[in-house]
Image (cartoon, grey):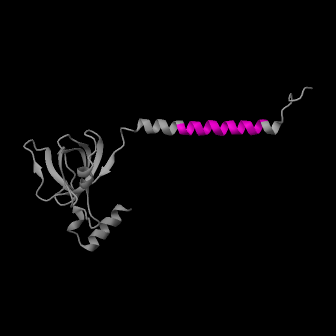
Amino acid sequence: MTEGATSHPLKKAKHQRLALVVVAVVALVAAALIATWALRNQASFFYVPSEIVSDPPPAGQAVRLGGMVETGSLVTKPDGVTIDFVVGDGDARVPVEYKGIVPDLFQEGSGVVAEGRMLANGTFRADTLLAKHDENYIPRELQDMTAAQKQAAIEETTK
């Protein structure tokens, strides 16, 4: 028998496990890169008005704008479905344009998150509006109820 013709069975198993681990790591890295590449256009960064004013995102990039709808800024266009308003954060203001049905909680002086894109003229064109409420929010249906009626309504929905 020549030297090296026989291989040690433990060495062979060790090399197979190492090869399997290397293949698994390469597959995981490849999957992560493919997922990142596929989702690159779906990423949406969150900005407040002062960030958009100081360092605006590229025109057309999908972003989220969050802040407060300034009182007195809400204007409904003649078509009845397009609105203009201003979102502010106390330091800066961003004009927003939205076409569609607004959420029930959307109103002046309330919080809003608008998903959309900045236009070249500095206006934010929103595709979606998400109205925010404070921690004291009470649904309209419960506002005129007594404490006992509210408790009964809550118990009815949790059955």
- Establish if 19 lies above or below 92: above
Residue at the extreme left: 78
Height in image: 135 above or below 106?
below
Which residue is situated farthest in the bottom direction here? Answer: 147
Residue 112 appears anywhere in the view: no
Q: Main secondary structure of the magenta part?
A: helix
In the displayed structure image, the side of residue 23 where residue 150 appears, left or right = left
Residue 114, horizontal then vertical, whole percent: 25, 49
Q: Is residue 16 above or below residue 98?
A: above
User: Residue 142 location, x and y as percent?
Assistant: 24, 65
Residue 132 relative to residue 73: left or right: right
The residue drawn where x is 65% and y is 40% is 21
Residue occupying the point 24% across, 72% down: 146
Q: Magenta residues, as a range?
A: 12-29
Most foreground residue, 9 or 101: 9
Q: Is residue 78 magenta?
A: no
The residue at the point 15 percent across, 51 percent down is: 85
Tell me residue 65's x, y (percent). 26, 50
